[in-house]
């Protein structure tokens, strides 16, 4: 398995782990509202909700960081692996510093959210067309939600809903990017080719 496929495999597995951990944590948190509760409320909820959320988020970040290393080694693009690494470090930070550790938590969350959106936005350079258009659209959607959330507009979705409009578009793209990189498809310049392996 070459470096690009290793990166894709790790990113995809990390995304799957966090997706399952997030939803299981929501289910196991009595009275949790995806609209009225912040996502990070899961990290300080009753056990096993907090353990599932924090553990899966930390693993997501760790696997994403490792994947970004292999993507860097692949050398096809230098921007995406750096953005992915910063976002992954932020995700690990959110998994370590719960929301009551305000300064570290907020900084980590900003890194995770903002750089995940930028990764989605700029990964069009890596995947080519037509998926590049989808990656850019999802990145812009996530960045738009960041702007609305910081201006105090939740668009009627509640604080948890607008946070999910930041997280989900970029997160969906991360899983898609992982699957794409793990497959035999690669991008060379503007041409999409299939690897011989």
Image (cartoon, helix red, strand yellow):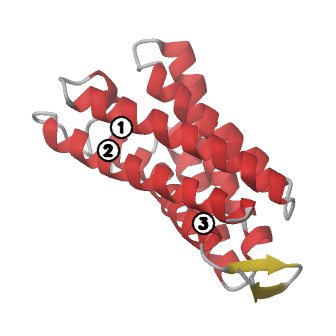
Q: Nearer the viewer, mark 2 or mark 1?
A: 2
Residue 149 in picture, x, y percent from top left: 50, 42
Q: Quadrant of residue 54?
A: top left
> Which callout, 3 or 2, points at the residue further toward the start of the chain?
2
Residue at coordinates 45% horizontally, 45% vertically from top-left?
Answer: 153
Horizontal side, residue 10 vs residue 23: left or right: right
For disc 1, the neighbor class at 10 Å (few under 14, some 14 to 19, many from 20) is: many
Element marked by disc 3: helix
Residue 160 in picture, x, y percent from top left: 34, 42
Measured Cα–Cα span from mark 3 to mark 1: 23 Å
With respect to residue 102, does 171 lie above or below? below
Front residue (pair 81, 40): 81
Residue that badge 2 annotates: 22
Q: For the N terminus, which image quadrant?
A: bottom right
Q: Could you tell me if residue 38 is visible in this image?
A: no
Residue at coordinates 84% horizontally, 61% vertically from top-left?
Answer: 77
Element marked by disc 1: helix
Q: Could you tell me if residue 53 is visible in this image?
A: yes
């Amino acid at each position: 398995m070459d470096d690009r496929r290793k990166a894709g495999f790790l990113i995809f597995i990390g995304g799957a782990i966090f997706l399952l951990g997030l939803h299981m944590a929501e289910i196991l948190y009595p009275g949790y509202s995806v609209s009225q509760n912040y996502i990070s409320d899961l990290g300080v909820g009753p056990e096993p909700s907090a353990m599932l959320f924090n553990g899966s988020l930390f693993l997501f970040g760790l696997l994403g960081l490792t994947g970004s290393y292999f993507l860097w080694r692949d050398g096809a693009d230098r921007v995406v692996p750096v953005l992915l690494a910063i976002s992954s470090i932020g995700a690990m930070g959110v998994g370590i510093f719960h929301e009551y550790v305000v300064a570290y938590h907020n900084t980590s969350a900003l890194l995770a959210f903002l750089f995940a959106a930028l990764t989605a936005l700029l990964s069009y350079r890596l995947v080519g067309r037509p998926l590049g258009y989808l990656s850019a659209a999802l990145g812009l959607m996530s960045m738009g939600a960041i702007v609305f959330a910081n201006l105090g507009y939740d668009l009627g979705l509640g604080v948890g809903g607008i946070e999910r409009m930041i997280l989900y578009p970029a997160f969906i793209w991360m899983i898609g990017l992982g699957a794409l990189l793990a497959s035999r498809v690669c991008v060379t310049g503007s041409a999409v080719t299939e690897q011989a392996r």
